[in-house]
Image (cartoon, helix red, strand yellow):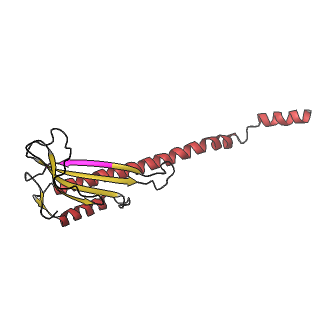
């Protein structure tokens, strides 16, 4: 029995290996925090790029008076370049010309989509209060992006980002699409 007491006493007072035990307890928490912050930053960057792409589609569309399908398709291609280095397959976009009629109802004049269906001509849309008066128009740019984490550690499922931009035409009262 005295030998067992001496062994336990030596073991209890031995300080060697304390750092290894502390590291083993703290390392999983620190690694989880590191990967979690990396995933959060990647998701935030993807959302910011999608926001920028959506605003650029609206901005480019609102600059002219008449736009064509091919020009809109080129604008969507530019939006895909903005998303780089993130995958562009999950990016779905739509741009529409909307006019508020004399009754105060905002309706779609034309629409074009990339990965997202175009809105039907005459479809009623909601425009924020005070954005446009009766008889005025606005360019409505919408996008969704299904972000799937490259690590899949803390975000195993895709997260859907959505963004909507409203821009008034710059040089004309209404932007029209000649062949939409």
> In the figure, residue 85 lies in which quadrant?
bottom left
How many badges with numbers are in the image?
A: 0
Please report the residue visible at 17 percent of the width from the left and 55 percent of the height from the top.
Answer: 121
Please report the residue visible at 46 percent of the width from the left and 49 percent of the height from the top.
Answer: 38
Considering depth in this image, is 180 or 82 the residue closer to the camera? 180
Considering depth in this image, is 70 or 170 the residue closer to the camera? 70
> In the figure, residue 178 lies in which quadrant?
bottom left
Please report the residue visible at 81 percent of the width from the left and 36 percent of the height from the top.
Answer: 10
Question: How far across and how far down the image is residue 133, in percent?
Answer: 10, 42
Q: Quadrant of the C terminus?
A: bottom left
Question: How far across and how far down the image is residue 99, in percent?
Answer: 12, 49
Q: Magenta stretch containing residue 165, yes or no?
A: yes
Asked if 80 appears above or below 5 in the picture, the reply is: below
Q: Quadrant of the N terminus?
A: top right
**Looking at this rendering, what residue extends furthest in the bottom direction?**
70
Question: How far across and how far down the image is residue 150, in percent?
Answer: 46, 56
Q: Magenta stretch containing residue 57, yes or no?
A: no
* Magenta span dominant secondary structure: strand
In the rendered structure, the answer to whether residue 60 lies left or right of residue 1 reads left
In the rendered structure, the answer to whether residue 35 lies left or right of residue 12 reads left
- Please report the bounds of the magenta region as a residue range: 162-171
Considering depth in this image, is 28 or 53 the residue closer to the camera? 53
In the rendered structure, the answer to whether residue 110 lies left or right of residue 53 reads left
Question: How far across and how far down the image is residue 41, in percent?
Answer: 42, 48
């Amino acid at each position: 029995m005295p030998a067992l007491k001496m062994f336990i006493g030596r073991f209890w007072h031995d300080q060697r290996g304390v750092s290894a035990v502390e590291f083993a307890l703290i390392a999983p928490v620190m690694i989880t925090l590191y990967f979690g912050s990396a995933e959060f930053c990647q998701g935030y960057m993807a959302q910011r790029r999608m926001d920028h792409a959506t605003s650029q589609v609206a901005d480019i569309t609102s600059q002219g008076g008449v736009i064509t399908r091919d020009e809109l398709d080129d604008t969507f291609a530019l939006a895909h370049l903005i998303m780089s280095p993130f995958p562009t397959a999950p990016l779905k976009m739509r741009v529409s010309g909307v006019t508020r009629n004399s009754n105060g109802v905002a309706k779609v004049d034309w629409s074009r989509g990339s990965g997202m269906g175009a809105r039907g001509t005459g479809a009623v849309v909601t425009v924020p209060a005070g954005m446009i008066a009766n008889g005025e128009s606005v360019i409505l740019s919408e996008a969704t992006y299904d972000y799937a984490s490259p690590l899949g550690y803390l975000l195993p499922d895709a997260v859907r980002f959505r963004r909507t931009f409203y821009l008034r035409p710059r040089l004309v009262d209404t932007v029209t699409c000649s062949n939409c």
